[in-house]
Image: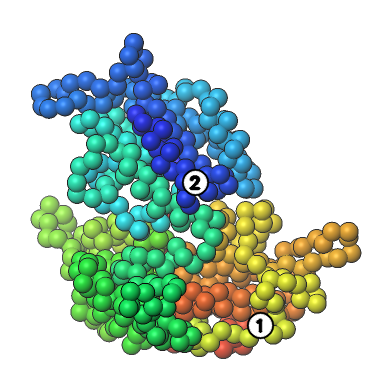
Amino acid sequence: MRFHVLTLFPQMIEQGLSESITGRALKQNIISLNTVNIRDFAHNKHNKVDDYTYGGGAGMLMQAEPVYQAVRSVVSQINKCNQVHSGDNSEKNIADENILYENTSYKNTAEEIKNHNARLIYVTPQGSVFNQQMAAEFAKCDDLIFLCGHYEGIDERVLEETVTDYVSIGDYVLTGGELPSMVMIDAISRLVPGVLHNDISAETESFHGNLLEYPQYSRPVEWHDKKVPDVLMSGNQKKINAWRLEKSIERTKERRPDLYAGFKRLDKCREFLMKNKLLHIDMIELINRGCAEILFEADGEYLLRDMVSKVCFHTRPDEGVSKLIDLAPEDDTKSVDKYSSQHIPETVTDQITNGIVLHQQRYVELFKANGFNETVECRQAVYTNKEKLSVSGLYRPDGKPMPNGLTIRKLDAADIQEAAPMYPGFDNPDYIIERIEAGAVYGAFFGDNTANDTINTLAGIIGIHEEGSIGMLYVKPQYRHRKLATALETYAFNRALENGWIPYGQIIVGNEASMKLQESMGLHFSKSSVYWMTKNNA
C-alpha cells in the first residue's frame, strides 16, 4: 500500500512514521510513504504558497495553484506506477516504485486530475469523523493521498476539483493536517496484511463491535496489592471469553455511552435474529464480528449493512408488508404510481451500493420493482459445534507435509497467478486477488520430491468472503476424490473457530455435490433460502 502526503512539512511526516510498527513496515516495503512538499510547486522567488483571503478575515490561506500542481504530480506518479504493474499480479517492489516517483513528469490534464481513481483525503475539522470502519475501508486502497492544510485552510476551488474525502480526527483545531494524517496512516497501516505479525490482533482491538477492549494484565501476578483476576489464569477459554465480554460491556457503558447505545441496539437485533439462527446466521455473524450497522428497523424488520463489504441484509420474518415502503415521501409533483405499495424510496436504495441479501422470497419482487436483479438463491449451511473439527488424516496443523505431501496454508501474493483462475469472481474478476491480499484465502499444496528441490503444486483453494461466509472452494479435477475438499473446509472452519467465529457458508440451490459435502461435515441447513440481489446498474 502506498501513502502520499502533500504537506509544507515533509520531514515532520517522515520522522513521525519512521519508528515502531509503521517504521518496520516501511523498511520491509510492506507499505511506502511518499511525501510531497507543496512549496516545490510555488513558482515564485520565495516559494510562497499563501495569500490573504477575499472578503477579509484573520490569517492567510493556502493558494489553489501550488496545491493543484502537487496533486497533479502525485496522480501522475500513481498512474505511471499502475501502468508499470498492469498485468503483473506479483508482489510490488515498492523500492523500485520510489525511484519511479522521483523521475515522473507531470503532464496530466485537468480532467484526469478531477477523475483520478485514488482517494484524496483532505484533513479538516469540517470532515466526517475518522473511525475504525473508515480505516478498514481505506486499507483496501492501493494508494491514499493526504492533503494537509495549514494557516486558515486551502482555497475552496482546488478542494472541489481534487478531494474525494473530507475527514476529521475530532472536534478541535490543530495548526495543520500533519498530525491527523499520521494518526490515520498509523490506524490504516495496522490493517494492511503483513504489517502486524499477529493476524488476529487487528480484529480484536478497541472499537471492534461497538465495544471497548477488555482490561489486560501481564506479569507479575500481584503488583501493588492488585492481583490478576483468577479467571484469566484458569486456562478455561470459555470462561475467559465470557469475562472479557462482560468487562468490555462494563467499560463501554462507563466510558463511552455513545458506543454502548449502539451496542445495545445491535444486541437487541441479534436477539431477534437468533429466533431463526440458521436462516439469519450471516446477519448474526455480521453483528458478532463488529461489522454491522443498522440502516433501518421497525416492527420486526431489519436492514443491516456490512461496514466492510457494503453488502446489505434484509429480513422481516412475519407475513407483514415491508415498512421500507412507508418511508416514501408524499410528493405531489410525482406520479401516483411512483409511490405505490411497491416503492422503496431512493434514500434507502441509494445506500445499497454492493448488493443485498434477502431472507424471505416474498420480497424478491419488491426489490425487482425497485431496480434490483436476483442473481442467486442459496441455502445457509452452519457449523453449530463450538469444538474444532478433527484434522486426523487430513492435514497437519503445524504446517508440515502429510505422508502424501499435502500441506495447507494461507495464500500470499506469490500464489495469485496460479490461484486466480480457480475462482472467476462473477462480476469482479479481481475479487479473489483482493481476498488473497487480505489474507483470507487458503490453499492445498502437494509436494513433488522427485526433483532436487521440492516443488509444491496448488491443488485447491478455499476462502472467507468479504461479508464473512466461507466459500470459493475449488479443487482441480486431477486432485478430486482424495478428501481434499473436506481437508480445505476443515482448515477454514478451524481457522474461523480460532477467531471466535461461527463457520458458515451459502450453498447455491442445485449444487448437490456441495450439499452432500456439508452434510458429511455435520453442517445444518436453513429450511428456507436467502436471495442475493444486485442493482440493475451495478
Image location of residue 278, percent across then percent down: 42, 84
* Residue placed under numbered mark 2 in the picture: 23
Q: Residue at x 37, y 44 (%)?
A: 182
Q: Is residue 325 left or right of residue 518?
A: left
Q: Which residue is drawn at 61% across and 76% down?
A: 491
Q: Which residue lies furthest to the front in this view?
A: 224
For the residue marked with disc 1, what is the amino acid? Answer: Val
Q: In which quarter of the image is residue 344?
A: bottom left
Image location of residue 1, percent across then percent down: 50, 46
Mark 2 residue element: helix
* Residue placed under numbered mark 1 in the picture: 391
Q: Is residue 23 left or right of residue 176?
A: right
User: How far apart in space, not on screen, are marks 1 and 2 (Cα)?
Assistant: 39 Å
Q: Is residue 137 above or below residue 164?
A: below
Q: In which quarter of the image is residue 531?
A: bottom left
Residue 215 seen in the current view: yes
- Mark closer to the observer (1, 2): 2
Q: Which residue is drawn at 56% across and 78% down?
A: 494
Mark 1 residue element: loop
Q: In which quarter of the image is residue 111?
A: top left
Q: Is residue 160 left or right of residue 393?
A: left
